[in-house]
């Protein structure tokens, strides 16, 4: 990873059928910027879920976890804050993961 890459995520589908990845660019995105269609190779993203992510130690050590008004989840809020601090985020489509289903009974 180059020195500006803060995270690399493995894609995984949400329970709703789109990927737990967000992109600010047009193209393969669902409502709210979630990526709906599978990509190829390694590409830039603006946010992801914490389900399967490789993250730089200095990035997570320096982050105060929060969820500001208007933000739905704390994990995309983390990526937005990191992006504002100059970090970039990638997804590697060659290592897709599965979203775990937790049973409470």
Image (tube, grey):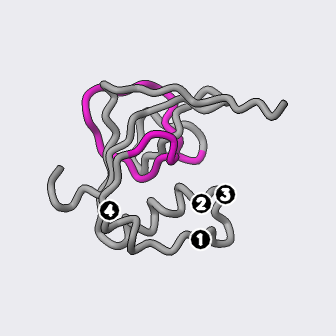
Q: Do callouts 3 and 4 mark residues in contact (Cβ within 8 Å)?
A: no
Residue identifier under label 2: 74
Image vertical order of residue 105 relative to residue 69, above or below: above
Image vertical order of residue 44 relative to residue 30, above or below: below
Please state the horizontal and vertical placement of residue 35, each as a whole percent of the image: 49, 36
**The residue tagged with tag 4: helix, strand or loop?**
helix
Query: Which residue is more in the foreground, 10 or 83?
Result: 10
Queried whether the magenta region covers residue 51, the answer comes back as yes
The span picked out in magenta is 32-53
Q: Do callouts 2 and 1 mark residues in contact (Cβ within 8 Å)?
A: yes
Queried whether the magenta region covers residue 23, the answer comes back as no
78 relative position to 68: left or right: left
Which callout, 1 or 4, points at the residue further toward the start of the chain?
4
Which callout, 1 or 3, points at the residue further toward the start of the chain?
1
Q: CA distance from mark 2 to mark 1?
A: 6 Å
Q: Residue at x 80, y 34 (%)?
A: 104
Q: Quadrant of the C terminus?
A: top right
Residue identifier under label 3: 72
Q: Residue at x 63, y 63 (%)?
A: 71
Residue identifier under label 4: 57
10 relative position to 20: left or right: left
Residue identifier under label 1: 66
Of circles 1 and 4, which is in front? 4
Q: CA distance from mark 3 to mark 4?
A: 25 Å
Of circles 3 and 2, which is in front? 2
């Amino acid at each position: 990873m180059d020195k500006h890459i803060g995270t690399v995520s493995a894609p995984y589908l949400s329970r709703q059928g789109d990927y737990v990845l967000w992109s600010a660019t047009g193209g393969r995105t669902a409502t709210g910027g979630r990526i709906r269609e599978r990509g190829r190779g390694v590409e830039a993203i603006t946010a992801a879920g914490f389900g399967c992510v490789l993250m730089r130690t200095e990035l997570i050590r320096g982050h105060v976890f929060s969820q500001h008004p208007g933000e739905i989840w704390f994990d995309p809020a983390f990526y937005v804050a990191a992006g504002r601090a100059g970090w970039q985020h990638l997804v590697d489509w060659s290592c897709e993961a599965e979203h775990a289903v937790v049973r409470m009974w």
